[in-house]
Image: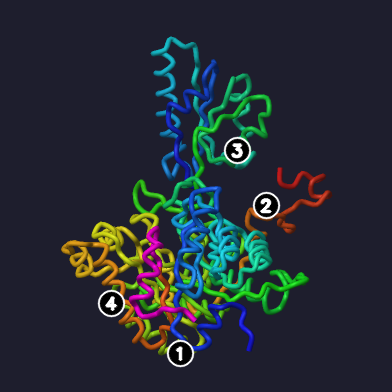
Amino acid sequence: MIIAEQKEIARIIEMIDGRRSVLVAGCRSCVAVCQAGGEREVAALAEALRLHAAAGGLERSVETVTVERQCEKEWVQEIAHLVEGKDAVLSLACGVGAQVMQALYPEVQVLPGLNTSNMGAPVEQGVYEERCGGCGDCVLHLTGGICPVARCSKSLLNGPCGGSQNGRCEIDPETPCAWELIYRSLVRLGHPELIEVNIPPKDWMPSRHGGPRRIVRKSAVLSDEERDRGVGL
Amino acid sequence: MSYRSNLERVLASGRFAVTAEIGPPKSASGDAVRQRARMLRGHADAFNLTDNQTAIVRLSSVASAALCIQEGIEPVVQMTCRDRNRIALQSDLLGAASLGVRNVLCLSGDHQTFGNQKGAKNVYDLDPIQELVVFRRMRDEGMVWGGDALEQAPQVFLGATTNPFADPFELRAVRLAKKVSAGAEFVQTQAVFDLERFERFMEQVRERRLDEKVHVLAGVIPLRSAGAARYMRDKVSGMSVPDEIVDRMKNAPEPKKEGVRICLETIEQLRSVRGVHGIHIMAIGWEDIVPEVVEQAGLSPRP
């Protein structure tokens, strides 16, 4: 899932300065799970913004909505009646959701209420950790199911650097050394020999370094004839 | 047999080699490098120029190496993977070779969060093992990564680092083996204070017969103060400084002299470890002590 966190309220207030009608738009997917932009967070933030407006004697209406998935236009289309006429939408979705919102409603400014961080997982209540670097060429089969691209501070592909100590990464005692984890996992899986394999320079083209990525799944793309028949609507 | 560098020649002759580190200044003037080069000339076989060590911006290692060549000492250029992608690494290797550099040390580099540019992007397009693979191909096959031919290949003696004191311990020799198979001809180790652990590391190195394929230069640091010893023991990941060393520094009436004494004792012991072919002195801002250390260790004059 995508991990995000809410911007500081002071930054949000700066962003909406001068807007008289604001729609706070949340998302029930990833950002709801990481408690940054779900229904509850939308309600709390809207209330805080109303209080701030009232305290400052500002004339501002703050409405709320939370869609199923802000990254899919089908869900975002359904709130047209709420968006139209607003001075701004404060999106509490990830950066993807905020952009889908903006693309669908080009006349209304969409403001980002969250900072989108990474592709990760909740490891315990309220703790979320990065897991995937989105490199486009997965190596988990070689690394015991632990990603060195996302989880090694230097994204090393051939083992731990000299800063690995007691299972910890030198940059932060809270960060486990990914290569220590990889090594332990390979031993558990019965494949310690994989640690000896020299992984050659990685092709970063499928990563963002080949430019913005676009994936076309031909089997899912509608033919002209299917479009004419209205398939997929 | 012709050698690419003086360091390679000394190591190939079987003589115990000495390298020492020169830290470039935070300056647009090369005077400090020239001064150190003049002061150190003749006291080691080659001199490492660090590459923005601890991620602090300094005069570049390639430019510093060129200054050293002008002053008549042989440089070892350190090239980290932290700041340059494969385009810049290959280009800088060509640039260094064109200026007369004949020793290059491949390393990952200290993470940028330790330095004075904490907000920097970290590159790590290649890791140091891949850097060795790419550089070796440039040298031996005369082509850049991807296959384009070079008009002239860089004739460099390739080195790497190895840290016997990091974890997991059993992977340290494995990683050295990977570096050797990637093209490392010499390696310099993290500073040795913990001889017991270093000996165990070297046992693993010999078990894999890596000592027959690569020249290991054991790192040493002359300590200047008890505070420095304590800092390395407590704060630097991948260093092992026994309490005994810290205590000796703490109780010494003249800590600097004690630091040199410890350094000399360490060198003496390292010389008897099978597979150790030289030492690498990292004086870290105390470069003027290097001649004294080399002389008192009985390693002067250099061949």
Residues marked 4 and 2 touching at CB (< 8 Å): no
- Cα distance between the residues tagged 4 and 2: 58 Å
| Residue B109 placement (x, y as % from top left) | 49, 61
Report the residue marked by disc 2.
A213
Report the residue marked by disc 4.
B265
Which one is in front in this view, the residue at disc 4 or the one at disc 2?
A: 4
- Cα distance between the residues tagged 1 and 3: 64 Å
- Cα distance between the residues tagged 1 and 2: 46 Å
- Cα distance between the residues tagged 1 and 4: 27 Å
Q: Residue at x 23, y 68 (%)?
A: B245
Amino acid type, callout 1:
Arg
Label 1 vs 4, first from the N-terminus: 1
- Most foreground residue, B116 or A166: B116
Amino acid type, callout 2:
Arg
Q: Which image quadrant for residue A83? A: top right
Label 3 vs 2, first from the N-terminus: 3
Amino acid type, callout 3:
Trp
Numbered tag placed on residue B209 in the rendering: 1
Numbered range of the magenta stretch? B282-303
Label 4 Cα neighbours within 10 Å, binned few <14 / some 14-19 / many ≥20: few
Report the residue marked by disc 3.
A75
Check the residue under mark 2 and report the chain it is in. A
In the rendered view, does B225 fall on the left or right side of B138? Answer: left
Numbered tag placed on residue B46 in the rendering: none
- Most foreground residue, B176 or B170: B176
Which one is in front in this view, the residue at disc 1 or the one at disc 3?
A: 1
Residues marked 1 and 3 touching at CB (< 8 Å): no
